Amino acid sequence: MERKVRVRFAPSPTGPLHIGGVRTALYNYIFARQHGGDMILRIEDTDSRRFVPGAEDYINESLAWLGIGIDEGVREGGAYGPYKQSERRDIYREHVKMLLDAGKAYIAFDTPEELEAARAETPNFQYDASTRGRMNNSLTLPAEEVERRIAAGDQYVVRFLIEPGREVKVNDLIRGEVTINSSILDDKVLYKSADDLPTYHLANIVDDHLMEVSHVIRGEEWLPSAPLHVLLYEAFGWSDTMPQFVHLPLLLKPVGNGKLSKRDGDKLGFPVFPLEWHDPKSGEISAGYRENGYVPEAVVNFLALLGWNPGDDSEVMSMQQLIDKFSFEHCSKSGAKFDYKKGLWFNHEYMIAMPDEELAALFMPVLEKKGVTGFTPEYVAKAVGMVKGRANLVGDLWEQGDFFFKAPETYAEKDVRKRWSEDTPRIMEELIGVLDGIEDMTSANAEKIVLGWIEENGYHLGNVMNAFRLAVVGACRGPHMFDITELMPKQEVTDRIRRAIATINR
């Protein structure tokens, strides 16, 4: 019987969720939904020294913002909990004992000073079959001594006993079969008595098995640990339920070589975290995609195509389309350059396609920060709809359409020099009279009347219309002029023209 697809995303609450981790979560989610499976969120908090307050909430909020749904987790519950590793101590103790009783692991009392001395004595020292015989562990000490030291409260670790000379095969859905000789592996620490918690290696294997995880989809950086995990599955007698491994390509710097880092984002001006992060220790604030004006669907689409392609020319795809098209066969083995400019392009495309009302709702917090109030949602939506084609980010809507919400306080100097002559104030006074006489200020009707007046008086169309725009907008920019005046109250339009007449001096 074919196993049900069950995947897990297992971040550590040690800080903000990196965008590389977001992509890993996304691929897990897409794969699970494609196969009618379950998405598990497991919190790996066994390293108590690195715990950061607020990080777990940040992870949950980030995934929710991006639309990455969780079926089982700390918040959602489920039949395989607890879903926080610090709450599974009894389970890990039981499995540590299983390995010790089976002779698959051993207790080591080596102090940090003793380990440092061994490293100094032996170049490239690692704790393995060639060195453990001279170290301070249950393989070299009498059983009575081991029991006595444990009873006395001496701190110890439990190490996995790796037999050298074995060819360990890891089957990976992206990389194929990877073979590593066990002789290069060290006897990894599986458990530490100091905090009564397991290390990553043991906890993950036990949890993946007990939670019936079918596919372990994680970053390429975890590939070196895969042979150890294969050996652990064998040691527990779980080979038949070993999950299928998938190691995703790294996200690389946009410029140069190496893994994408926060420093790259700071240098080039793009976020590497989904949400803004306030470091509780340093007080440092790191930029987030949400606060920088990205649409979550655009971020998802952008990330999905970093290291994977749909096998055709598709680019802009909904979450459901990604689910329908996704395949590990089209994932790259090599790293993917983080083309943040392409991310902006995706956001632009999604903003254009978004209903004006929805985009206006995202824009409202920007208006609030600018101290702008008193405009109806309908007004904001229409204004946004006129300028969104020129914006890449939600914040750009202010730069492109601020004149809809406040009168210009200054006027672009180059436009004044080019578009405002000695005759302009007189002509603008006439224009005020023309506008005052228009009852129907819809774009088409106002345009017909104003252009007719310009032609009738023999005025230069470009000069008049550009001066009109300069007076209302503050610069020769923006959407169709009569679309602007249809939305704005007519009194506001004429007041702005009067202000420009009184303010602009040539």
Image (spheres, rainbow, N blue to C red):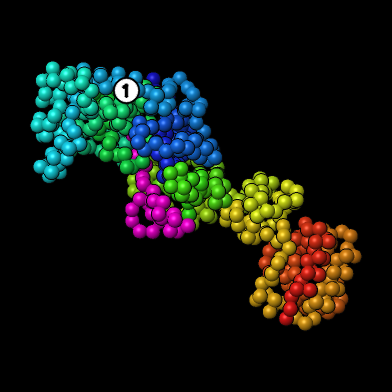
**Image side of residue 491 versus residue 312, left or right:** right
State whether residue 76 is above or below residue 376: above
In the rendered image, is residue 432 in sight? yes
Q: Position of residue 160 (x, y in %)?
A: 21, 28
Residue for point 78% across, 69% down: 499
Residue for point 31% across, 25% down: 196
Magenta stretch contains residue 264: yes
Q: Which residue is denoted by mark 1 in the rendering?
A: 92
> What is the crowding at mark 1: few (fewer than 14 residues within 10 Å), some, or many (at least 20)?
many
Residue for point 39% across, 59% down: 255
Magenta stretch contains residue 435: no
Residue type pointed to by label 1 = Tyr
Comparing 386 with 309, the one in front is 386
Q: Secondary structure at mark 1?
A: helix
Comparing 67 with 52, the one in front is 52
Q: Which residues are magenta?
A: 244-269
User: Residue lying farthest front?
Assistant: 152
Comparing 227 with 314, the one in front is 227
**Image side of residue 68 versus residue 202, left or right:** right
In the rendered image, is residue 183 in sight? no
Q: Position of residue 311 (x, y in %)?
A: 44, 46
Q: Position of residue 495 (x, y in %)?
A: 81, 65
Residue for point 69% across, 57% down: 386
